[in-house]
Amino acid sequence: MRVLLFLLFCLVVSPVFSQTEGWATFAKTKFEAKYNEKAGEYFLYPAFPQALKDMVGKEFELEGHYLPIDIEGDAYIILSKYPFSQCFFCGGAGPESIAEVWFKSKPGKFEPDQYIRVKGKLKLNDSDLEHGNFILVDAELIK
């Protein structure tokens, strides 16, 4: 009984946002198409919910599929809720289904669509078109 209570306590007070809740919380973000003068086309701009804004700077976990869109030499990857064939870039999923992950140190090579779990500090981006809307910094690979 004590072990069960301890596990329940750890689950309730854990400072890390679980990977299941992460994608679900990202999905609550509303996007509006706005014209970008500099690029000369429309882009989806996010309006983040307050619950997600409250998570900025806190540890956040995600599980997903590695997308082979990384830049050689950088310690970052794109993590997707869906495999490559269904992802935001190829399959029509929304921008809430991908996250940019910046590792503390380069984690090594991944296979396309490899399912991984990461933990990092959440950062939100609502204006820089060179980056994703959902970013994990100081991230670590969780085995």
Image (cartoon, helix red, strand yellow):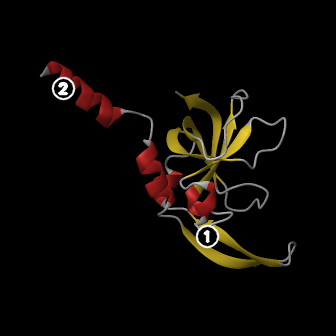
Q: Nearer the viewer, residue 50 or 71?
A: 71
Vertical arrangement, residue 112 with respect to residue 85, above or below = above
> What is the residue that sits farthest to the left in this orientation?
1
Quarter holding residue 116: top right
Residue type (three-letter) at the residue carrying disc 2: Leu
Q: Nearer the viewer, mark 2 or mark 1?
A: 1
Check disc 1 and report its element: helix, strand or loop: loop
Residue for badge 1: 92
Residue drawn at point x = 55 percent, y = 56 percent: 82
Vertical arrangement, residue 54 with respect to residue 138, above or below = below
Give the percent coordinates (x, y) of residue 112: 66, 45
Residue drawn at point x = 76 percent, y = 45 percent: 70
Residue for badge 2: 4
Residue drawn at point x = 67 percent, y = 65 percent: 90
* 7 left or right, relative to 60: left
Look at the image and tell me whether residue 87 can be seen. no
Look at the image and tell me whether residue 50 can be seen. yes
Which quarter of the figure is the N terminus placed in? top left
Residue type (three-letter) at the residue carrying disc 1: Gly
Q: Earlier in the sequence, mark 2 or mark 1?
A: 2
Give the percent coordinates (x, y) of residue 129: 77, 62
